[in-house]
Image (spheres, helix red, strand yellow):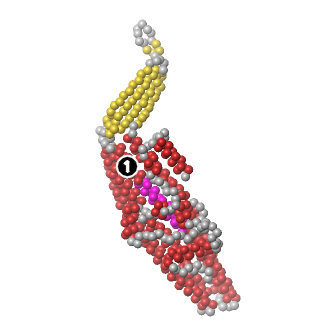
Amino acid sequence: MAILDVKRAGVGALRMGVFGLVAAVVTGVSAPVARADTFADALVSAYNHSGLLEQNRALLRAADEDVAAAGAALKPVLRWTASLTQRFGRAQTSLLVGAQDADSLVANGSLIADLLLYDFGATALGIDVAKETVLATRQALISIEQQVLQRAVQAYMGVIESNEFVALRQNNLRVLTQELRAARNRFEVGEVTRTDVALAEAQLAQARSGLASAQGNLAIAIEEYRNVIGRKPGRLAPPPRLPKLSKSVDAAKALAVRTHPDLRGVQHQVTAAELAIKRAEAQKRPTVSAQGTLSLSKNLDSSNFSTGASIGLNAGGTIYAGGARSAAVRRAQAQRDAQRGNLHVVRHNVQQNVGIAYAQLSSARASLEASERQIRAARIAFRGVREEATLGARTTLDVLDAEQALLDAEAARISAQSQVYVATYLVLSTQGQLTARDLRLPVQQYDVTEYYNLVKDSPTKQSEQGAQLDRVLKRLQKN
């Protein structure tokens, strides 16, 4: 029987043997003629190809700009106004002189500078809120990165698993074809009945259906791979050795609470909400600002003109606004309480996800070991039943049942191997360690501080920093 026969010498040896053999069977390559796509290649391609990462990097840059906008309120504001007025009328300046036209065309221009001097820290607190929001958005980007890489792991293993199922179903079809041929030969000499032949034909038809289903699942897996990785899968290399994990689930949970981006992001959101309360309270207080004005008025119908300049301090505040400002404080307090509740929920969800991931990994490992024992037993049983059937001690149905049991065991092993890999990387994801940095992927990692450092001080386009910012934006747009 031409089935995959790999001796178990540890999970690593089994994985390498089975995946390597099946990849060669499916692609029809007996010797490597081209470099196979590796597991790391797929992760790198997924990282570079992901539009979801690009989307959330842009959202982070938008949050960076909120810091710049908030900080701009502490800088001078320079405004200008201009007007051109045509006046019509008649005027009489003396009893001896009659009324005369008093039409005139007057141009006015003003240059006004405003500077906030003191607002009890409301603006500074607004800047701090924006900064905390940036930090939370950075953590959200890390979370998205983990999702992208986890999906890449699933896509890679999905193609390998689907390829193995196709190879297994093709082999099963060949075996059942031989069984049907043997049953027909035995029927012709009177050793079996027409019922045995019909059973073999039915089993063969079921095998064809199973092969078609496996091929359909392979096509689906290829489309998922193309979507996630960015290209159609070629010859896939066996996945590398599994990464090491914490042996203790409690230790893994403790690590996840410290490092998971979802939890860190909510912590920043809680801090931002607490600062927002202080800002809302400060906004109820007066503000002090300075204003300077330079004005020019010119009568275009004569040589008359006037200029003026002024500088002064302005102070003001709201005495009563219908309770709107007190409502803003209470609203900020309610949002703070909501974020605290969310922190509680996220912490427990992170811990739960770690426990679930470890349970899935343990189940997959146990299933893999059990399927190995099941395959050994089913193979022996199948060979024995087939030999007994040639002696007339077993029926064709017994042979077909034994073949199906072996097929089920082989399929269980294929699924378990894939599940072990997916579950292992899921554990890393639940701990916040499934990132390009942690996996040491050879990619150009996105620098979350570069853009922030350029825009946090609100540079103008004419400044050196503004020119550098333009270069960064052009580079991002090209990518």
Name the spot of residue 287 as percent of width and height, x first. Answer: 32, 38
As displayed, is residue 255 above or below residue 59? below
Q: In this rendering, would 196 be left or right of 422?
A: right
The amino acid marked with disc number 1 is Val
User: In the depicted view, which residue is nearer to us: 19 or 151?
Assistant: 19
Quarter of the rendering containing residue 259 = bottom left
Name the spot of residue 184 as percent of width and height, x first. Answer: 68, 85
Name the spot of residue 471 as percent of width and height, x first. Answer: 52, 46
Please report the residue visible at 37 percent of the width from the left and 49 percent of the height from the top: 129
As displayed, is residue 376 above or below residue 75? below
Q: In this rendering, would 201 be left or right of 299?
A: right
As displayed, is residue 291 above or below residue 368? above
User: In the depicted view, which residue is nearer to us: 15 or 56?
Assistant: 15
- Quick check: can you spot residue 214? no
User: In the depicted view, which residue is nearer to us: 122 or 95?
Assistant: 122
Give the class, few, some or many, for how many residues have Cα within 10 Å of label 1's Cα (few <14, many ≥20). Answer: many
As displayed, is residue 328 above or below residue 33? above
Per the image, is 147 magenta?
A: yes
Element at badge 1?
A: helix
- Quick check: can you spot residue 278? yes
The residue carrying mark 1 is 129
Q: Most prominent secondary structure in the magenta stretch?
A: helix
So how many labels did they put on this image? 1
- Tell me which segment is drawn in magenta: 136-157
Quarter of the rendering containing residue 34 = bottom right
Please report the residue visible at 62 percent of the width from the left and 78 percent of the height from the top: 171
